[in-house]
Amino acid sequence: MNETTPSSLTCRVPLAVPGSRRTERCYALQGKTRGRDPGANVLVELVLLDEERDVRNVLGYHRAQGRFVCDVESGWRVLGWRMADGSMPYGDYELVDPELAQIDQLPEAGCTYDIDLSVNIHFRNGVPPEWPSLLT
């Protein structure tokens, strides 16, 4: 018998309801573009949300699946996005009520200075060459 634990249950909350006082028009990350993205390194307008349910629109770009980068301080989550060129690759935008968003399920907006610049060096046979000493 398969038992489902409460932690594995995901509650689907509507993006907006008829009585929503404020809505944003965008492709919601919890909506029809869930699992889809605008493409790698594509310029987008992000609709951001913080813990107080404040909304902010900023330009940024899509870096990887579920990873958007823009110039904001930490704490902002990506509620949705719009193409910066005005195109609508997935049809009409959705109406999204920031008050109904499941903030804990939204990815945090990455900062432009938070880009991984690490370098991986691979040596033949896993052994680095003998480097000459600069002290001799």
Image: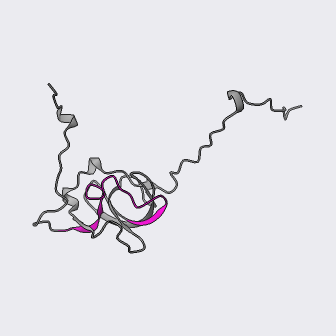
Of residues 49 and 86, the one nearer the viewer is 86
Q: Residue furthest front?
A: 1
Residue 25 among those drawn in magenta: yes
Work out which quarter of the rendered image holds the C terminus and state it.
top right
Residue drawn at point x = 37 percent, y = 51 percent: 108
Question: Could you tell me residue 97's position as x and y percent?
Answer: 20, 62
Residue in front for this viewpoint, 96 or 87: 87
Query: Split into 4 quadrants, where in the image is the N terminus?
Result: top left
Camera-nearest residue between 106 and 32: 32
Relative image position of residue 31 (x, y in whole percent): 25, 57
In the image: residue 45, left or right of residue 2: right
Using residue 1 as the reference point, say whether residue 32 is left or right of it: right
- What segment carries the magenta color? 22-45
Taking the view exactly as shown, the residue that stands out farthest to the bottom is: 86
User: Whole-percent x and y of residue 83?
Assistant: 39, 69
Residue 22 placement (x, y as % from top left): 19, 68
